[in-house]
Image (spheres, grey):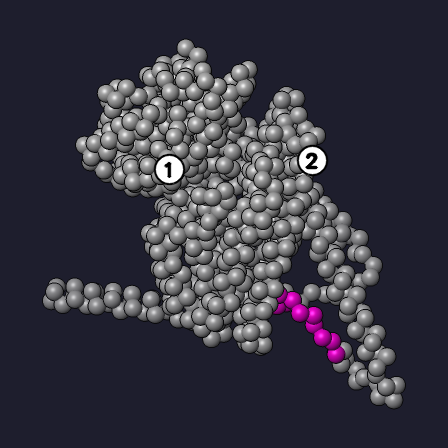
Amino acid sequence: MLRRSRLDTYEGGLTWIREFLAGLTRVDAATAGGVRHTRDLRLDFFRGLALWFIFLDHIPDNIVSWLTVRNYGFSDATEIFVFISGYTAVIAYSGIMRQGGWVRAAARILGRVWQLYVAHMMLFVVLTASVAWTAVSHSKGDTFLEHMNLTGLGQTPYETLVQAALLKFRPLNLDVLPLYIVLLSSFPLMLPLVVRRPWAALSASLAVYVLARVMDWNLPGHPEGNTWFFNPFAWQLVFYAGATLASTGHIIERLHPARHLLDGLAIAYLAAAAFVTLGWYYPPLEALLPDAIGRLIYPIDKTSVDPLRLIHFLAVAYLVARLTPADSPFLQRWYALPLRRCGEFSLAIFCLGTFLSFVGYVVVATYADVVSWPKALDMAVSIAGLAIMVGAAYFAHWYKSSDKSSAKSSVKRSDTIRRPSSAPASEGAAPETVAPETDVPNLRPAEPAQSDVMDLPAAAGRRRGVLTLALTLGLAALLLALAAPGPALAGPEKCPAARENLVLGTTLPRVKLAIRERKKVVIVALGSSSTQGHGATAEVNTYPRQMEISLARQFVDVRLKFAIFNKGIGGQDVTEMLERLDRDVIARDPDLVIWQAGTNAALKGMPLDVFKLKLSAGVERVKKAGADVVLMTPQYVPAVIALSNEDDYIGAMETIARDQGVGVFKRFQIMRDWVTGEHMPYAQFMISDGLHLNDFGQRCMGKLLAKAIEETIRD
């Protein structure tokens, strides 16, 4: 009897799972293709919120960015923006395909792609001109050029402009629109499948995502050897996830039978992600994370949308959709209207926000040393920028509304002229009008006709609402400034390092000979992603480039020239570096080789004896070619210190250096002192993947390495 009861329970569970999955994958005819009878105000609201977050996050070291999602989990506003873009794309173009056919829908999509491309190029021109003017007129002009990744434009202007037109060269913060252009360019081919077989479309998208991560697919960037910061082959999954959910419809209702389980899993995952992320700002929290967990989760890659980021965003989206039905009253409130307006005109507001983030950076960089409380400057710049964005969105709405009103009035007048006087219109008949074509069907709820005379009480109410919103933001920013950890928000002006950690342990004889002979010193930086510059916002911020700049300044008295070649390739270990040693290193007849190794060998579990054998053989080959060698130890970051044997690889590198008579740059020890001695949070020098250095970390490594080389040469 007990056995029969267990069997019934088992069969009942299987039946429930089959019914749940059948309901989940069913496509309702009423909502297939993203058909909506009323405009979903949530899309405008959360797209506007993402635009606000992007603006705040793009201002470096902004205290107000603590209000955004990036500091409390693995995903950020980029996932929100791309997901909603896929969702609205189905709503906008599926109806056009049904009414006018696939060719018409494809033409409209490509027309939108061209509009995005033109907007991107206009933003590029305006932003570049603004940076150039600031560089000429400002005392910190070179800093702004370097920060915005525009030094290459002055060195090779024609080539850089061509690469910008091809979307291969992009200044800082201009990566999102090119990503959207590529994703939307693929949409005409996917639209029929998304509308008719949405789950098949999502499966195809998932397959491309997996292949892209396994095969390292990405689009080439500029300069040569770079790739896109947002990998379109991976980010397309976020786009088509939104498109699929828009096409199927009512996904939250279908998940309702499993809501308790899903709610618990989502909340638990978000809490765990917040714990990990906050640990980058509060080292005592990070110390509580077991090393086994660290080895499992790191690195959390943004370029190719790490699965942890994807799951985090889906958990956020699920809970938000559960808590925010389409008819939520707050979406109609005054405080939601500024966000909705920004979301309605997302392209214009995104471009404006990108430009304002640079303006905000210039203002903060100019006056941060003057004001007594720099955090107040952050708050003022952030609130002013958001106010300008909201004002522009309201203006765009007014302009569009007045344009439509004028068009309707013109149609009515022409209709009156055409109507014969002997045949008056029947009472109550609607005038014959032709709706202008738009990319997005008119899905708004019916609104009362607007009067020619402004409703003064309503306008006053809106002004009070916007003023109250600004005061609320100001109060929230003030409380945040008082509560947020100061050291995590602004990098120290100096890069601390103990003197013993700058002793290379070699005399650099080849470099000293080149200096005596007044020859150009050729240096090759060999390594993996941290040498290539993964995590840096611009090539100029990579440690090889910063080392070159610092060395040129240190030896300006003797006009010594340095030529530094960056030969870092992401993901490679010592085996793959050996295979290209002759081509990329020895063929350039270098005076000095900086060899960064150990991190990927440790992460991939390369046997220690194999690592020692291969690295030792490579060092010997470089020495026979006549070059000096300095080995660079791994980073002190969560992904590395979570390993159980990272010290073994560091010890092996020091042993090889001692036996072979070459130098060691103690990057691991320097960064460990930052955390344990300087109490510097990981977020100060590391990007959010838990592995790679950010601009500050890269710049510091370049400056400290240059300092170590200088002290060795002048000794």
Please report the residue visible at 55 percent of the width from the left and 45 percent of the height from the top. 170
Question: Is residue 239 shown in magenta?
Answer: no
Please report the residue visible at 73 percent of the width from the left and 47 percent of the height from the top. 463
Check residue 584 in the rendering and tell me which mark sits there, or answer none.
1
**Neighbour class for label 1 at 10 Å: few (<14), some, many (≥20)?**
some
35 sits to left or right of 23: right
**Relative to residue 176, is residue 403 depicted above or below?**
below
- The image quarter in which residue 447 lies: bottom right
Under mark 2, the amino acid is: Trp
Q: Is residue 471 visible?
A: no
Q: Quadrant of the C terminus?
A: top left
Q: How many marks?
A: 2
The residue that mark 2 highlights is 133
Residue 268 % position (x, y): 36, 46
Under mark 1, the amino acid is: Asp
332 sits to left or right of 658: right
**Relative to residue 658, is residue 18 depicted above or below?**
below
Q: Nearer the viewer, residue 358 or 67?
A: 358
Q: Secondary structure at mark 1?
A: helix
- The image quarter in which residue 594 lies: top left
**Relative to residue 557, is residue 377 depicted above or below?**
below
Inter-mark Cα distance, 2 to 1:
38 Å
The stretch in magenta equals: 432-443
Q: Nearer the viewer, residue 238 or 482?
A: 238
